[in-house]
Amino acid sequence: MKFNATQIPYRSTGLFSNLVNDYMEAKGTAQSFVEYNATIDGYKKAIKQRASFPTNRKVLVKVLQNQYTQLEKEVSGSNTLNNKESFKLVNDNVSLLLKENTFTVTTAHQPNIFTGPLYFIYKIIHAIQLAAELKKQFPANNFVPVYYMGSEDADLQEVGSYTLAGEAYQWNTKQKGAIGRMKVDDELIQLLQNLEGYWSVKPLGKEALEVLKQAYQKGKTISEATLALVHSYFGKYGLVVIQPDDSKLKSLFIDVMEKELRTGFSQKAIGATKEKLASTYHVQSDGRDLNLFYLKENSRARIEKQGGTYTIVDTDIRFTEEEIVKELHANPERFSPNVILRGVYQETILPSVAFIGGGGELAYWMELKNVFNEVKVHYPILQLRNSFMFMNEKQTANWNTLGFTLEHLFKPVLELELEYIKSQTKENLALTNHIESLNELYESIQQDVIRIDTSLGDHAKNLSVQAQKKLALLEKKMVRAEKRKQQISIDRIQNIKGSLFPKNSLQERVENFAEWVGDYGWDWVEAIMQHSTTLNSSFSIITITKD
């Protein structure tokens, strides 16, 4: 198979916010909300600045080494997951993190079951490719691609679901709390068996399916399963996975969390930025007076301060200020940053120069520069992740037959239908010229009528409006009649648009990788690797044709 990529400017798709478009094009005021531009010069500055911010590399490396030692033991008996070359590449990258000239290129995502939507994979691949490109541009430094696992997310509805062949599947577990701490149970095994039935008829799905089966063993936590899964797929590229829900890592963040508990500094820090953003753009995240959660057993609940009392929402747990600070120092793993502080935590434990995220992620990160400044944490370059849309052989052939360009894919269906019909008929389907002539005629009639009786002028005008409406209705009937003649092609337009924009959303936000790896094997992933731009993010349409 051949995978051919066409890059489309983000603004041309009409699917991205003005804030993201302006940021990518260095227009408007978007650049004022970040520290650096996402350019070679911006990276040069970020690398220099990042070196002056302290990172506890010893603790970071120790945690990662323990994590991968444990993983290697767990998969020692699996021919599918135990790739010694992958472990060596990852462990070498982990060791590099001890060096002051080593930086990370980080992307973050929740541990969606079975990887969830396609952009889970797109993010990771972008991090891998950008790290490799930065090494070429700045050979005196090392760059390690990192997937930061958002395992403390508690949105089971989102993280615990996936869509396959247009049908949504939901993990109906009774477990609660942080997703990463939940365990693979009978209900999740059942979902995996459903997936197995789908992949069993796919020509190239067996190998990837075996990875899923080995990773999601009953009793494992979702965090452990996701680590095994992602390492099996991407460890061979040197990708390092970090599980931030760790007491040693959170101990590095105690000072920031204590400041938040005592002063609520983060919400105050984003106030001026939100006001400035809102004057031109849409504000993404409001935050709360305290932007921390409390994790214990099967719950992740908000911390609220009422007078001098700290309340754990929906529980009977209460603390005074000194009690909750004491709890923080004794058990830092019980505290979890929300969206406003999560990035600060990430950049505290990792020596990042770049954060790769989607449009929504970058929008809320643009609110946070003052939060980073308040606690003297480095604010990284924001790199918009690459987006992809894949068209299989049949879709590609049918679209080409219709005579549309790939840019036409982003137009509304009705607009495409009308454009196609007009291109196929020799008849004039627009009555615009006749309507203009009719207007001139009725204006002349109105003038003649007014000279006889001014009160009849409005009547003549109403007749003109009624005649125009009837002609407009006639025009619609003419278009419908022509549509019936072209019904096969019209159906083809609707089917292609519906399949490429499932649920009226982008393909990458709905479909699961199983559909594509099952049909094309690892060549599909390699195609993303090949066409994943690094510094210049793009929306790429990849058409698949036979050799």
Image (tube, grey):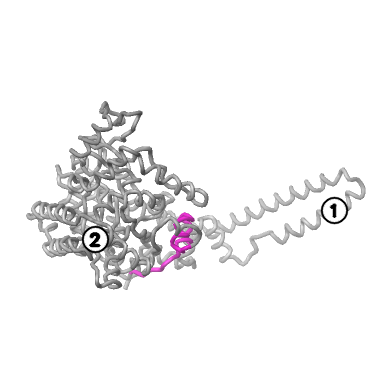
Position in image of residue 43 (x %, y %): 34, 66
Residue furthest right as drawn: 452
Position in image of residue 390 (x %, y %): 36, 62
Tell me the tag on residue 494.
none
Tell me what residue is drawn at x 18 percent, y 44 percent.
247
Q: Is residue 172 left or right of residue 361?
A: left
Amino acid type of the residue tagged 1 in the rendering: Ile
Q: Are marks 2 and 1 in contact (CB under 8 Å)?
A: no
Tell me what residue is drawn at x 25 percent, y 62 percent.
103
Which quadrant, please, contains the C terminus? bottom left
* Residue 309 occupies quadrant: top left
Q: Which residue is mark 2?
A: 203
Tell me what residue is drawn at x 62 percent, y 67 percent.
426
* Residue 220 occupies quadrant: top left
Q: Which of the pair 501/136 is nearer the observer?
A: 136
For residue 100, above or below residue 323? below
Does the stretch in magenta take in 522? Answer: no
Does the stretch in magenta take in 20? Answer: yes
Per the rendered image, the range of residues in magenta is 3-26
Amino acid type of the residue tagged 2 in the rendering: Pro
Mark 1 crowdedness (10 Å alpha carbons): few <14, some 14-19, many ≥20:
some
Q: CA distance from mark 2 to mark 1?
A: 73 Å
Which quadrant, please, contains the N terminus? bottom left
Position in image of residue 276 (x %, y %): 49, 50
Say which label, 2 or 1, has the lower sequence index: 2
Answer whether residue 534 is visible to the viewer in this image. no
Tell me what residue is drawn at x 43 percent, y 64 percent.
398
Tell me the tag on residue 445.
1
Answer whether residue 422 is visible to the viewer in this image. yes
